[in-house]
Amino acid sequence: MKGQLKVATPEEYIAAVDDARRADIAELDRLIRKNAPKLEPFIHSGILAYGPWHYKYASGREGDWFRIGVASNASYISLYVVAGDESGYVAEQFKESLPKAKIGKSCVRFKKLSDLDQKELVRLIRAGAKARGKV
């Protein structure tokens, strides 16, 4: 996973992000904390994460992950929303309402936070916090 930093706390992650992206990452952190207050912030695999989540497949394979994650990569910011509901992956449900982002199953990639409709971003965060985890 790209965007990994060798840090121990969310505050250290934000401080370690390059100057050009620090304000966007800090604002994204603020939005997630405000709109998903039950998701505890932490560092997982070197990225900013929220809501520790332990998963277990029917096969018996299991592991630890997060519900929402943020990574500052070389040319974009990644917002991971590792959640799904009866309609499928939550992030994919926002493809039309966040047209300036590249959206996969559980990852929303964008250049600048200002490229995204803030109301739709908040809806995505809230939906990701409510839905069950999915890998």
Image (cartoon, rainbow, N blue to C red):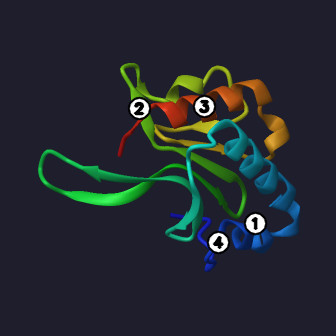
Q: Secondary structure at mark 4?
A: loop
Q: Which residue is mark 3?
A: 126
Q: Secondary structure at mark 2?
A: strand
Query: Which mark is on residue 84?
Result: 2
Q: Along the polypeptide, which appears first: circle 3 or circle 2?
A: 2
Amino acid at dot 2 = Gly
Q: Along the polypeptide, which appears first: circle 1 or circle 3?
A: 1
CB under 8 Å between discs 2 and 1: no
Depth check, mark 3 against mark 2: the one in front is 3
Rounded to the nearest angstrom, the CA distance separating label 4 from label 2 is: 27 Å
For residue 38, what is the image quadrant? Answer: top right
Rounded to the nearest angstrom, the CA distance separating label 4 from label 3 is: 23 Å
CB under 8 Å between discs 1 and 4: no
Amino acid at dot 3 = Arg
Q: Which residue is mark 4?
A: 9
Vertical order, 119 against 74 (above or below):
above
Residue 85 visible in rendering? yes
